[in-house]
Image (tube, rainbow, N blue to C red):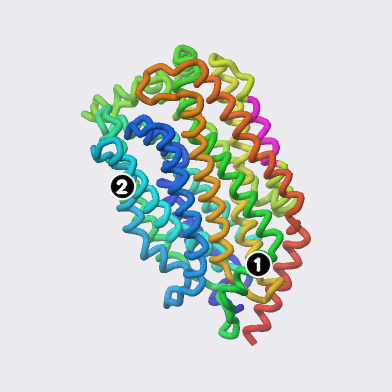
Amino acid sequence: MTSSTLSPTGKLSVMEKIGYSLGDLAANLIFQTLLTFIAFFYTDVYRIPANAAATIIFLGGLAGACFNPLMGLLADRTVTRWGKFRPWLLWTAIPFGLISILAFSTPDLGDNGKIIYATLTYILLMLVYSANNLPYSALSGVLTGSMQERNSLSSYRFVAVMVAQLIIQVLLLPLVLILGGGDKVEGFRNTMIIFAVAGTICFLVAFATTRERIVPTATQRSSIGQDIGDLLRNKPWVVLLLVTILVFVTLALKGGLYIYYFKNYLSEAALAQFLKDIGFIAFIEHLNAALVSVGLTRFQWPEDPATSAFSLFNGAGIICMIIGIGFSSPLAGRFGKRNVFGAALLVATLFMLAFYVYPPTSIGLVFGSQILHGFFYGITIPLLWAMIADVADYSEWKNNRRATALLFSAMIFGLKAGLSIGSALVAGLLSGYGYDGAQATQPQTVADGIRVSISIYASLPFLATVALLYFYEINKAAEHRIEQDLLTRRAAATH
């Protein structure tokens, strides 16, 4: 392996870390929308039956997941003056934006036509997401050979993820109502146009501000069969693949159900009283008055307790996740990524389970659990992707060959598989409990099913993840040994 110009300590500049993180901001404006709202968009906005929505989400996610290994092989064999992975940010920036707009458009094509349109645009979105996000993720493994710097880089990128998550989970529904004048169909389309333009610009900035430094030597040659064989013999990779699938099943399941939880389980009167007691309603009244005074009459916050409480709930959790991210790198430096990831995920899961016992009027407890869950889950967020980069180093250390994009493609496969399973479960569970998006009020069986789903069902994959980490053998001592051995090899290769 060789490396291009970098500081002697392997440190990346703040500008490059920020530039790289903008790629995650761009991708997550779309990804977080899918994670949180795709089932709601299909059932309540585009009026597709819940069982059909579950099929669309599962098939689209499966198509995207199966494309990932091919994309990984292609990215690893890409040769340009910009490197292997950076150019894909440039090539996919505009297509990603355009397809995102199409996927959240609602042409009136009849019942069957809508299902066909939704299926095609969702599959296209999954494919272009792979072509963009897989090389972007692999790029983190070749910007620097320092595992400590990767911890720092992961913290930067996942602060960007949290910013995108804050925008989507706190502001998307209000923006949809504002930009659509109360019409969710028009509002989703206009909002996604804004996100697509902003995301395209961020991808181009990420391309311009980063540099690939860890590159294969001219003597490294490996066949596709060797690369795949290395992957299958890489035990830490197998563990992380399963971990990634399970984590994203839970994220999609709980993320997609929260909007239904607020609209169909929690008491609207209790939500309104809670918002009044904490001063939120008074704050919004002053905000709306200020907007009206300057002529922005269309930009008033919606008068809907469920929407406001849902936005505040997500905002509180995300802010605490960002705080948790700040603890991630120093804790991992002291105790190792694996140990910190497992311990923090276990505690976060306990606060998810607590939702099972809360009655519809316990709004304060719901918010308190979300805040504590957010903090502990935030600690884990940068560690998963930093561990994936470590597994790429482990493969190089063990086999003297590096196939960064193929390894990351397998993890993106896990992400897509988990997302498709979790999102399909959202629509499938709703269909199984008898949810009908056209009804203003759902039966009690639906409300109870939603409560069980976001607590018990959503916690099971997280608990399985904690157990799997026992078999992940790259602990703190192994991290140090692998990093030092690779530094020695790379230094020898340049002389």
- Name above or below for residue 166 compared with residue 210: above
Any part of residue 314 in sight: no
Any part of residue 493 in sight: yes
Residue at left offset 40%, top offset 22%: 283
User: Residue 199: x and y, percent?
Assistant: 37, 52
Secondary structure of the residue carrying tag 1 is: helix
- Disc 1 marks which residue? 393
Q: Is residue 212 left or right of residue 302?
A: right
Judge the density around disc 2: few (<14), some (14-19), many (≥20) Cα neighbours within 10 Å.
many
First in residue order: circle 1 vs circle 2:
2
The stretch of residues the image draws in magenta is 344-354
Q: Quadrant of residue 51?
A: top left
Residue at left offset 46%, top offset 18%: 275
Q: Is residue 203 left or right of residue 98?
A: right
Residue at left offset 73%, top offset 73%: 485
Q: Is residue 115 left or right of residue 412?
A: left
